[in-house]
Amino acid sequence: MTATEHPAANRTLGDRARDHLWLHFAQHGGYADSEIPVITRGEGPYVYDERGKRYFDGLAGLFAVQVGHGREELAEAAARQTKQLAYFPLWSHAHPGAVELAERIAAQAPGDLNRVFFTSGGGEAVETAWKLAKQYFRKTGKPGKHKVISRSLAYHGTSQGALSITGIPGAKQDFEPLVPSAIKVPNTNFYRAPVFADDYEAFGVWAAEEIGRAIEREGADTVAAVFLEPLQNTGGCFPPPPGYWQRVREICTEHDVLLVSDEVICAYGRLGHDFGANRYGYQPDIITVAKGLTSGYAPLGAMIADERLMAPFLSGDSSFTHGSTYGGHPVACAVAMANLDLLESEDLYGQVRANEANFRATLDKLLDLPIVGDVRGAGYFYGIELVKDAATKETFTAADAERVLQGFVSPALFEAGLYCRADDRAEPVIQLAPPLICTQDHFDEVEQILRSVLTEACTKL
Ligand code: PLP
């Protein structure tokens, strides 16, 4: 039955979207008197709405569209595979695309991360990693190891396991009780460091040691895994201080705890490398990926596990009792192969490395605005923290954040032609993660839009 009394004819999609479509993480009340924005097409780093208005895609969709929009190569790969074999599951059978993609991922992944378990997305890969950690320890004589440690504010997905690992209180509270045994430790927000505020390296050691202290408090024989992003997204891009990852690796090894590098955002070029672990030079036991693996052209994720983690499942009647219908979908695997071809042939990782200092320098210009407290990140991945007073780092009250950030900055940026994210799940930040094809002209375009909107925002404080 149709909910609307109004016929579809003569109504915009943005109007009709309000009738039946339930948006993710959206305040639908905000659309009571206005249309929902509808994006109809994309080309390069730009997307277009149903009226043909152009926006710079400052978030690569949702940290996904590495190679930019409208790439024929990926559309053709999907079409070819759909004609050849549109669907077959990975339940006790394989298909060529999954075999070849697993080979390719394993060849790129650091160390002995040679075993690839495909999923439909990032949260499912995280969920898979926790389940594997539990079952692996059961099978290897340490059945008590089941808890996980992750960082305050970090986002790892929304299914109940992944949400338990997620460290954003507001995303969790309505779903408690969640999966027990998910412990939180401090993140690496140096701008608001609670200790060693003038010594980045010492702060990093402290943050790493907090993981060790949490493991010891819980009992190492109960802790299965630590989940960390190479560079944490939520909160506004917290890079790892020098030495942080190396110390975390040592702590995990010391306590026989699996180190999971959640690279759903950071892999496939976001930080100028295939994997964030390779950028920062550490060896995880598991890497989780999604998003950039297909540049978002098809839903696909993967858990890439160390060889030894599959060993208990390779003989007798043993199996990892986990799977899904669409994990490793043939069309998504074909798209991923074509996407990896593009990332390589266009040397997009190299382009990010070559341009990141200029991107950073362009955004740093905004620090002359009193509302801009901090610019941080790496590669093509930045957070700009907005503050009430840059000198004291005083943050906004909840009411100001709602009024200035959600009420003005967010809609004004979109209106000015910049799609990005104004996030106030912690301190208010603007998040930027554009497609990897962007160059200086695009950085300038972003800076100019931000400058004009943030200058006006200053007058509203
Ligand atoms: N892990 C990280 C680090 C993420 O950033 C995300 C999503 O943004 C997820 C997991 C969840 O991925 P998905 O939305 O594909 O389930």
Image: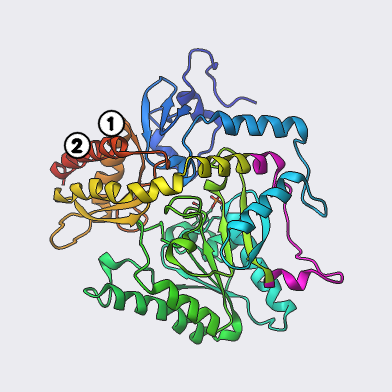
**Side of 395 where 77 appears, left or right:** right
Who is closer to the viewer here, 400 or 94? 94
User: Quarter of the image containing the N terminus?
Assistant: top right
Number of marks: 2
The image position of residue 166, as x and y in percent, is 49, 62
Against 37, residue 321 (above or below) is: below
Instruction: Kindly indicate whether the residue at mark 1 contacts the one at mark 2 (C-beta within 8 angstroms).
Output: yes
Residue 400 versus residue 137 in the image, above or below: above
* Disc 1 target residue: 416
**Mark 2 or mark 1: which comes first in sequence?**
1
**Is 73 on the left-hand or right-hand side of 425?**
right
Give, as a single range, the part of the protein colored magenta. Answer: 308-334
Gap in angstroms between the C-alphas marked 2 and 1: 9 Å
Residue 37 visible in this rendered orientation of the protein: yes
Residue at the disc numbered 2: 452
Mark 2, secondary structure of its residue: helix
Q: Residues within 10 Å of mark 2 (few under 14, many from 20)?
A: few
Q: Is mark 1 on a helix, strand or loop?
A: loop
The residue positioned 71% from the left and 34% from the top of the image is: 81
Q: Where is residue 391 in the image (x, y as percent from the top left)?
A: 13, 60
Q: Which residue lies furthest to the right in this view?
A: 316
Q: How is the image coloured?
A: rainbow
Give the image quarter of residue 279: bottom left
x and y percentages locating residue 104 in the rendered image = 64, 52
Q: Is residue 182 magenta?
A: no
Q: Which amino acid does label 2 sit on?
A: Ser
The one of 48 and 170 positioned closer to us in this rendering:
48
Q: In this rendered view, identify the residue nearer to me: 345 or 288.
A: 345
**Which residue is found at the position 52% from the left and 18% from the top?**
6
Left or right side of 112 for 311 = right
Tell me residue 329's x, y (percent). Answer: 70, 44
Q: Can residue 159 be seen from the camera position used here? A: no
